[in-house]
């Protein structure tokens, strides 16, 4: 809830606290939790859209294209303006005259008016940080900050360093390779200048996003393969190199999305192995974040000055039309490359109207593998004459010695090489907790058949299905690194030239086997199981 104080002439976020120190008339102006300052560069764009001069007026963005201008709520009709391509006519002018404000003094009235409220939420967040670290440090957890270069992670960074009185907390920058140019400048130059003692560790990937798009198609709101491959997997490797487990402080907030509204504040089970996630600002609203930025005079990513409301991958399918418009204005070369890729995909996959597919954003909601080469997820298995319970699993790719890696999650391997074949006995704890043999595999390198001989007490169907999942990985692996993040113990590595599993790390938990549909992200994305568009 956002209010307006007639006396202070500024937004108010907690009516009761403000009334303790001010007798000004307070009126409600918005049900939302969004109240962002509008900086000079965004104001220039608004003037073009509205065809007027806004002068030195202090403007606040209230969400849903609504702005508070001269104490009146104005809805900016930018969508039609954007669809008519009017932004392209003024793009060069805006790019050539970028003003970045570092002096926040014009907006500081909101800080004074909400000082008690702000102090309360800061105190609570810092107490949480201190208490959470105290809880986990005895188990060799060290504090780190997950740093994206966006406003929320910048706020968490400052909160953590202030709460712990430590300006050397490790920051992990998840570089997806799709960050805005301004994000790289902010992370590598501007933030580093203001925080010279902070160790900033970037993740790295060998994958090429646009090449992956040729395989999987452009990411959509339903096909988010990009996050797994370009962010989670690479960060996972960096966290494994830390001298202990990681207590990672993140800028995730409940109000950001429906999915995040269900998150616990502290998560002991994470996408990344050896990590506990802690979220100090999980209950903060958007206006809380901006209030803190102004009060602490935080340097932020320049993209917010242009008018971006969120800063992530510049071609994310969750970006709004407003964000897409800004990217066409300030990053025309990137957007042209993206447009070319989407058009090529639309034509390759037989879309009847590529212009409509791109312009109306239909690529954002595509599902399944429509038009792409569908991966056959069916692997045959037949009766084997070695016993009544034995099965032959028949794959497409000829088996070589590297297939051994895919059997390791099933249990400890005892391998015997004979002239006729390779015999692999697999041992693991069964349901009773007893450690004993679960099956034997017989393979001959150069063939496509795996003979599976389960022990009598073993569920043969379940065992065969698990092996099939592993064989789909073996058949389709392009070393995309998606599998690296599926192991909670960091045992899987695909980014050094081949698929390997470290037996010293693997705990046979089997989480990796069916993490993706039918075992492999290639099958997950490139299957006909989903409705297609």
Image (tube, helix red, strand yellow):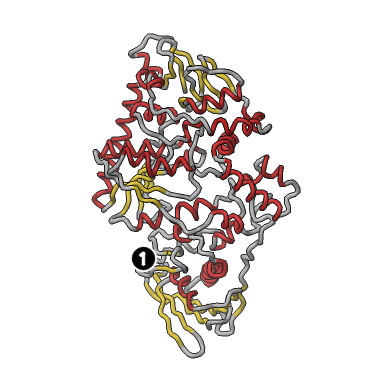
Residue found farthest to the right:
352
Q: Residues within 10 Å of mark 1 (few under 14, many from 20)?
A: few
Q: Quadrant of residue 244?
A: bottom left
Residue found farthest to the bottom:
419
In the foreground, 471 or 312: 312
Residue under the image location 51 percent in, 60 percent down: 480
Picture layout, residue 224 above or below residue 421: above
* Residue designated by label 1: 505
List x then y, in percent, for residue 322.
58, 33
Residue under the image location 53 percent in, 82 percent down: 445
In the foreground, 262 or 20: 20
Q: Is residue 472 left or right of residue 117?
A: right
Residue under the image location 61 percent in, 70 percent down: 379
Picture layout, residue 10 above or below residue 491: above
Residue 35 seen = no
List x then y, in percent, for residue 189.
37, 42
List x then y, in percent, for residue 175.
44, 49
In the foreground, 403 or 161: 161
Residue under the image location 48 percent in, 53 percent down: 230
List x then y, in percent, for residue 273.
38, 56
Q: Is residue 400 left or right of residue 102?
A: right
Picture layout, residue 234 above or below residue 328: below
| Circle 1 SS class | loop
């Amino acid at each position: 809830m956002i209010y307006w104080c007639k006396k202070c002439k500024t937004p108010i976020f907690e009516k009761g606290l403000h009334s303790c120190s001010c007798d000004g008339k307070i009126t409600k102006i918005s049900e939302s939790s969004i109240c962002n300052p509008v900086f000079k560069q965004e104001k220039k764009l608004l003037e073009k859209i509205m065809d007027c001069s806004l002068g030195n007026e202090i403007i606040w963005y209230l969400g849903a294209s609504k702005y508070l201008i001269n104490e009146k709520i104005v809805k900016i009709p930018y969508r039609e303006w954007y669809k008519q391509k009017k932004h392209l006519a003024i793009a060069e002018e805006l790019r050539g005259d970028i003003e970045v404000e570092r002096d926040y003094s014009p907006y500081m009235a909101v800080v004074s008016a909400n000082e008690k409220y702000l102090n309360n939420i800061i105190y609570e967040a810092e107490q949480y940080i201190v208490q959470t670290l105290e809880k986990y440090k005895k188990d060799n957890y060290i504090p780190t900050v997950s740093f994206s270069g966006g406003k929320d992670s910048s706020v968490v960074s400052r909160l953590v360093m202030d709460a712990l009185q430590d300006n050397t907390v490790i920051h992990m920058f998840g570089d997806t390779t799709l960050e805005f140019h301004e994000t790289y400048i902010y992370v590598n130059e501007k933030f580093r200048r203001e925080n010279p003692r902070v160790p900033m560790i970037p993740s790295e990937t060998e994958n090429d996003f646009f090449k992956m798009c040729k395989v999987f198609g452009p990411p959509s709101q339903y096909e988010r393969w990009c996050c797994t491959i370009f962010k989670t997997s690479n960060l996972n490797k960096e966290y494994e190199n830390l001298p202990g487990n990681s207590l990672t402080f993140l800028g995730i907030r409940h109000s950001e999305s429906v999915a995040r509204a269900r998150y616990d504040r502290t998560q002991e089970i994470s996408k990344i192995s050896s990590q506990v996630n802690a979220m100090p600002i999980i209950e903060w609203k958007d206006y809380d974040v901006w209030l803190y930025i102004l009060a602490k005079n935080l340097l932020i990513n320049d993209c917010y000055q242009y008018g971006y409301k969120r800063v992530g991958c510049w071609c994310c399918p969750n970006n709004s039309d407003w964000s897409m418009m800004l990217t066409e204005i300030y990053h025309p070369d990137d957007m042209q490359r993206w447009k070319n890729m989407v058009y090529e995909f639309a034509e390759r996959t037989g879309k009847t109207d590529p212009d409509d597919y791109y312009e109306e954003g239909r690529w954002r909601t595509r599902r399944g593998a429509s038009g792409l080469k569908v991966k056959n997820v069916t692997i045959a298995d037949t009766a084997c004459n070695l016993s009544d319970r034995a099965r032959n699993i028949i794959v497409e790719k000829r088996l070589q010695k590297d297939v051994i890696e895919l059997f390791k999650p099933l249990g400890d391997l005892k391998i015997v090489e004979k002239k006729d074949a390779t015999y692999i006995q697999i041992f693991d704890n069964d349901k009773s907790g007893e450690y004993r043999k679960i099956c034997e595999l017989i393979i001959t390198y150069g063939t496509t058949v795996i003979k599976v001989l389960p022990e009598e007490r073993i569920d043969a169907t379940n065992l065969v299905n698990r092996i099939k999942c592993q064989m789909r990985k073996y058949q389709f692996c392009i070393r995309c690194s998606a599998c690296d993040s599926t192991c909670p113990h960091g045992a899987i590595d695909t980014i050094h030239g081949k698929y390997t599993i470290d037996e010293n790390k693997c705990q046979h938990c089997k989480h990796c086997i069916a993490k993706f549909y039918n075992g492999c992200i290639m099958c997950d994305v490139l299957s006909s199981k989903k409705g297609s568009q």
